Image (tube, rainbow, N blue to C red):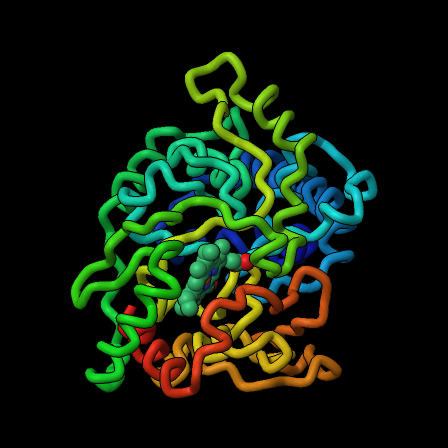
Amino acid sequence: MVLKLSVDERLAPARLFPLLEQNGTHLGLLDKLVWRVGVLPSFREGLISTRERLLPLMSSQPAWGPGRVDTFNPYKLIQFGVRAADLTPEERIGVADLPAVFEQGPRAGMNLHWDGNNASLDERNLSAAIGAGVTPYTVDHQAIHRVADWLKTLTPPPSPNRPNGESVERGRAIYRNACADCHGFQEPHHYVFEGKYLGQVEPITRLRTDRARLDSYADWFRQRQIDELFAGTRYHFRHFRKTDGYANLPLDGLWLRGPYLHNGSVPTLADLLKPPAERPRTFLRGLDLVDGVNGGFVSPSCDPATAADAKPFCFDTTLPGNGSGGHLYGVELAPANKAALLAYLLTF
Ligand code: HEC
């Protein structure tokens, strides 16, 4: 967005002033002069220098596609002035799905962020704002708290899927055995945020999902977050840590959360229960038609060779950071049990 906007010729008074007027903002002569010689030129200048910083990074990463963002690498370049060329090859790709934002209250104390690098809701929220471009100077703590309070109790809309009731009950028992310790579980009208390992970090050596996002959170960066951002204020970061895997997260609102895994590499729940070699290599990401049979959104396959024409976005699991391997839980179940487990998951 920033990359395109900064060089877009429509970002000019002749186009913007009439639009502002149309939307109810009246600009007097003096206002117009200030906008023309002050506001717009410095706005564009800021965008261009941000673009200069980000472009070398972004052009070396696979395209993010809708609903994904690299959280920590742009943060390194913008907040700490690091050059893209100075990032190690291991840390260069941290592209991940935007995580679910519902019911944050019960998540207090769990290891948050995909890699579980911070167990404080407040620090996670402030850091997320920084990742989105806020600076220690422009940050509006009150506004962040207002949104955070709202999200503490906001529940996801119930699943519209209607799987067979008897299968759901069989699937519930299978899930309790194989999944609930790490993820918590769904009751008919609410999610239960309880599980022996819920909120803990599962080591990557056992989990074996794509490790690029984990490696993008580098130890040097953690140190600078702590030492430099908000140091000496009440907002001083204290809880960031470097982990060795991804966090066992609650699965509430699962019907809305596809494609699955931290990098959005597995289009449907049915695919996640398949062995990695049988998961789709490519698929269309960003369609909003709910797939009531497989879980997630309808995601037909696509051809990366003509990816530019594929709408909304052709996701290629063979590119760096996009790997769809690992998370082998449930893949060995007998077909009838797998179908029952899927039926239960469709109710989340
Ligand atoms: C040992 C802990 C553990 C067990 C057991 C486990 N999972 Fe997971 N699960 C994880 C972790 C960690 C992730 C995040 C991995 C990633 O994104 O790379 C995850 C991710 C997921 C996701 C994707 C969530 C999202 O928002 O994209 C789903 C769905 C899921 N698990 C379902 C299951 C099911 C169903 C079972 C049982 C058959 C199961 N899990 C068993 C640890 C576990």
In the rendered image, the vertical position of residue 290 relative to residue 40, given as above or below = below
Instruction: Give percent across and percent down for residue 5.
Output: 62, 54
Tell me the quarter of the picture where residue 169 sits. Answer: bottom left
Tell me the quarter of the picture where residue 314 sits. Answer: bottom right
Q: Does residue 11 show up?
A: no
* Residue at point 46%, 15% (across, down): 233
Please give left or right for residue 132 compared with residue 164 in the image: right
Please give left or right for residue 313 compared with residue 251 in the image: right
Q: Residue furthest top?
A: 232
Instruction: Give percent across and percent down for residue 161.
Output: 28, 79
Instruction: Give percent across and percent down for residue 53.
Output: 74, 42
Depth order, front residue of 117/21:
117
Q: Does residue 116 show up?
A: yes
* Residue at point 37%, 56% (across, down): 183
Image quarter hosting the C terminus:
bottom left
Ligand 1 quadrant assignment: bottom left
Q: Residue furthest left?
A: 189
Depth order, front residue of 304/345:
345
* Residue at point 36%, 55% (across, down): 181
Instruction: Give percent across and percent down for residue 187.
Output: 20, 64
In the rendered image, the vertical position of residue 35 relative to residue 344, given as above or below = above
* Residue at point 52%, 78% (across, down): 274
Image quarter hosting the N terminus:
bottom right
